[in-house]
Amino acid sequence: MASISSLFFQIASIFYILLIGVAYFFKKKVDTLENRVYSSLIIIIFITLILDCLSVSLGLIYPNLYVTNLFGKLYLVSILAWVFAFTYYIFVISFHKEKNNIVIDRSSKTYIYFKKYFHLFLLLFVLAGSIVLIAPLNVYGDGKIMYTYGPSAILSYSFAAICIVSWVIFIVLNIKRVGLKKYIPVFAFVVLAGIAVVIQSSFPQYLLVTAAATFITILTYFTIENPDIKIIEQLQLAKEQADKANHAKTDFLSSMSHEIRTPLNAIVGFSDCIRHTDTLEEAKDNAKDIVNASNTLLEIVNGILDISKIEAGKLEIVNSPYDAKELFSSLAKLIKSRMDEKGLDFQVYIAPDLPKVLYGDHANVKKVVTNILSNASKYTDKGFVRYEVNCVNNGNRCRLIISVEDSGRGIKKENIDKLFTKFQRLEEDRNTTIEGTGLGLAITKQLVELMGGKVIVHTVYGEGSKFTIILDQPIEKESALQKVQGPNLTHLDLTGVRILVVDDNTLNLKVATKLFERYHATIECVDSGFRCLEKIQAGEKYDIILLDDMMPKMSGVETLQKLKQLPNFSIPVVALTANAITGMREKYLADGFNDYLAKPIEKDEMIRVFASILHLSEDVTGKLFETTELLDVDDDVNTSTTNNKEVYNEDYLRSHGVDIDHALDLLGDMEMYKMTLHDYLDEIDGKVEQLKKYLDVHDMPNYAILVHSMKSDAKYLGFMSYADICYQHELKSKENDYSYCVEHFSELKNELQKYLDVARSFSKHVN
């Protein structure tokens, strides 16, 4: 096979094939048919090189030993194995229907097709290898030269030649489709094999076949279309993120489509009412409701325009003081027209102790309540819908309990889990006439949880449902709301104020003119930035300029820049634009505008801007702040003690955590409070004992009923933190959460005992 000098080729080949093997096997790659066959080529050629080195070494020293003959045959079989594997490799790249090898899929027709032919090639190799092993092999070795000859060697070369002929056939049939690049190793092998045969004819000790096969294996590595798996993973991740963003966008726009229907229906309904109304007063009431619905619709449109929300796949919670009573009352009016259309008995109750001003995301509170009311209307054909807003006030926090109960269709128990799933509409066959995408409740749950609340569902199939939203909101002073809304300028008088409105839209100019004329302002309108500049350059004086941004030829920002270049220009300029997405106000302020107004112009926002820029004010506002501060001082004086001696009055209760003000709002006066407290103290021990018995026997239904009663009693007496704990027990017992009630029962008793100590001491001294 070779002299000792030819081992240098084998050793060098082993070194290079190891390098390629490490680079190939330790690098992530796509699992394709081509890669799988190439993996076998590397392994086979490595084994062949080892057998070649062993057979050469033994043949030089012990040419006549049986083991030398055996290793010689094993070498011939291994080189034959490489030839058959390379033939199968050429077959795979030639007859694969796809230009690029696809990822392995064991169930695919492609995989099954090539697996069948793999078994055929394997069978042919086993037959050929068996013949080579059985056939005689002669080994010549004189200590200097060693090579093999005889039938076994001739047969192995013959089988290899047949395989090479098949390569030519594969290439002729497929070169146009596959391309020349893939077949470069074949052409290289033919050339190298020819050179090796010529050299070995004259110098039999230099057997170069194994080295040639190694070189071809290494060359093939560079023809495999095997992209960096890391890049593929990054591309896949980018694709998934793009798909996620696209799905978020689709979901968001679908949900907005769902939410637009309610205010739009109200606008259409009340507009139709105006057409048929008999009195001006009734028409004004309907117009007011249209304005409320329009404002709701405007908030939804603003949400659609907020691209940052879509890309993030979530909605931002923006908290601010809001008029709670006005908000929940307006929602009732908004939905009433739909209830009336179906002839439903729409019952509304808003707790009298609901704080005037709360701090939260009022826009999203409106969305979730609107969704619940809308669902009740859609799925109730007859009977009633009851809308309640209750609260538990504890210090400076208010727990809103918003419930919507209906006598509608109800929900099957097995479908309750699907209720808050996006695009999931229950019983589609039964609800085919009902509009909607099934997003309303999914949106509601997401928003409520983002605001730190929860949604509870109680339903009986065929009888109706009750949805309850629990939401904690801080209580704010009324002065905080006025700070947000601006001064109380309901009687705004802009007499003598000159306003220049710059907008390329004629309709917008007409609307702005009618709006500002209502406040006796002097209005001038121009339809471009050029006309605006002409007015100012001509020496016209204005108190404020309202400047649209999106105008042809010269934008509002460009107009402002040119205005600021004029000598002695000092007129306040407000950006007036429909570009109302989040962050635009900050952008326009950074561009040099004094303030920002979104179109369509909202009255309250317009008043805020004018009050700020024109320094308008009203004495009522100042007096209100002053009065509030004086009351706070008085409260501090009243809650103090004289000479450290307890005074058992309302302030005593207040200083010990009893919300006596809330209790008196409910009960009317102090005498009624004392009577109620006396009766409560007589009964409370028995109720606690009975509650413990229900807990001991796992009677959660009766536990819920009794703890609900105890919560109501506590609320009447101003024991708010205890009432809050009772409410948690009520919710958990209704969910049959026995472990929660057991673990927190001592907390309930301890909180109660704290109030009882105060109440008994108070009752003892005042009776």
Image: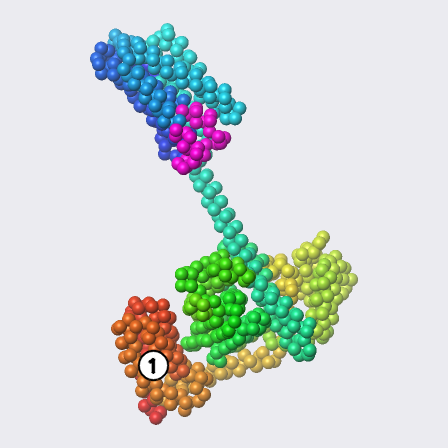
Write the residue at 48% across / 21% down: 171
**Is any atom of residue 733 visible in this view?**
yes
Per the image, the residue denoted by label 1 is 755
Residue 436 location (% of width, % of height): 54, 60
Which stretch did the figure color magenta? 88-116
Side (left or right) of 755 relative to 620: left
Residue 393 location (% of width, % of height): 43, 76
Question: For residue 233, what is the image quadrant?
Answer: top left
Q: Is residue 101 magenta?
A: yes
Determine the residue located farthest toward the bottom in the rendered image.
767
Residue 283 vertical position relative to residue 526 in the rendered view, above or below: below
Write the residue at 34% across / 11% down: 154
Write the residue at 39% across / 11% down: 197
Side (left or right) of 464 relative to 119: right
Q: Is residue 469 magenta?
A: no
Q: Mark 1: which amino acid?
A: Tyr
Determine the residue located farthest toward the right in the rendered image.
538
Residue 17 location (% of width, % of height): 36, 25
Of the pair 30 and 558, the residue shown nearer to us:
30
Image coloring type? rainbow
Residue 132 vertical position relative to residue 114 in the rendered view, above or below: above
Determine the residue located farthest toward the top in the rendered image.
202
Residue 384 vertical position relative to residue 23 in the rendered view, above or below: below
